[in-house]
Image (spheres, rainbow, N blue to C red):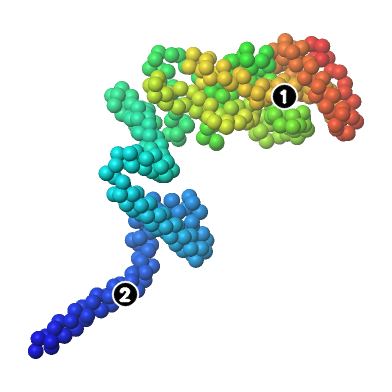
Amino acid sequence: MLTDLLWFFNAKHQYENQKRLGLAGLIGLLLPIFVAWKWNDWFYPLFKKLGFVAFAERHGMISDMPIFTFLHIAAAVLAICLLALLGFIIVGMIMFIFGTLGSSNLGVTILAIPVIILLSPIILPIVIREYWKHRQSNEVKNGMIPTYKKDPELRPLLTKYKDSEKNLQGYELYAEQRKRHGDEIQYVYGRKLESLLNRAVLSIETDRNWAIGYCISKKQNYILFPNPLPIFASQCAEYIPMRPYSVIYKFNNLNSYRFSDDYCSRELHVPALPIEFIWDADKQKLVPSIPENAKMVLQNLSFIRHSMGCNHLDFKELQDNVSQRTDVFKWNKIAHTMLYFIPRVFPYEVNTDIESAISKEVKNIPNADVFYSLYAADVQECEQYFKEVNQDYRAIQLKKFDLGYGL
């Protein structure tokens, strides 16, 4: 009787175990089907919110083919499992060794050094990451937005310019900052901006009467430098590395468009360098700065809005740095070289003895007659370049055209 009773309880126990295993197997079978069914509705949004999707995309785990995506993710999971297993083994070994030698202070000291060395690849990145998090947290706390929100006088400005594009917002908030400090801002627009920039200069180092403007097409703030070339030829101020003097070939097209409806031939283009207004946590104000890897461009002034002069003390350090840049120097040099060289190649209109438009207009450029001698050597270098390397240029007879200052 007792034997039968024990057999009954053993059979029931076996049944329960098999039932449990059967349910787990059933769940394991149905779970992938359920995940695939509800992937777009439940699981993908959840993983995206948790940052898993962005992580996978950043590390190239997402592929156009689902099978490769599955293999990449499976490999990543396997690698994580192996690392975790390795970590458990290392921790287990350390606990075993400490358990064996833990009673000895000398043993603990001897073990501590290799353990620290062994764990340093894991601990050091964590320490560095936490340090940068702490530093960034302090920067955020001392950043522009929190500072403006805490100040009743500044808070309305965030609302006023909240819809502005990021770089335009920086420009506008900087202008408001200058006004609060009682500074008079020299706004320059249209013909006034053209007059400021369409002139010859002694050098970028000595003449810093530039402008700052926001380009509506590129959504970027720029330092705008003077360009002495007449408006319809102003695109010849572009510096082309390795072959800077070849920009003269642009002049043929620009000259032919002079009387057309092409707006590019009737708008002043000037050398420009990107600029941004960043928050200085130490000074607690916006300051002008040149972005890393900023490159010179030729900017059409018709797309410039919200422009101002940059003679203020805020720009002093920036101007000192900019005036020493090699690229700025080269762009200024090529613009002035073309100013004096193009009239030598095109002194007359095509097939006529009529003085060319470029020759006429150069005479009206402010300071063109004053600074020619400073660029005479560059003009001669340009002429020599074309004589040596350009066969078409050799067929052009250079005619010395008297512009009134010895050209």
Displayed quadrant of residue 127: top left
Give residue 359's position: percent from left, percent from top: 78, 20
Q: Nearer the viewer, residue 397 or 114?
A: 114
Label placed on residue 52: none
Q: Nearer the viewer, residue 385 or 121?
A: 121
Mark 2 crowdedness (10 Å alpha carbons): few <14, some 14-19, many ≥20? few
**137 left or right of 394?**
left
Which type of secondary structure does the marked residue at label 1 adopt? Answer: helix
Which residue occupies 47% across, 32% down? 167
Judged by depth in the image, the label closer to the viewer, 1 or 2, is 2
Displayed quadrant of residue 333: top right
Q: Amino acid at mark 2?
A: Gly
Relative to 399, residue 235 above or below: below
Q: Provide the residue designation for mark 1.
A: 334
Q: Provide the residue designation for mark 2.
A: 25
Which residue occupies 51% across, 63% down? 68
Q: Amino acid at mark 1?
A: Ile
Relative to 24, residue 210 above or below: above
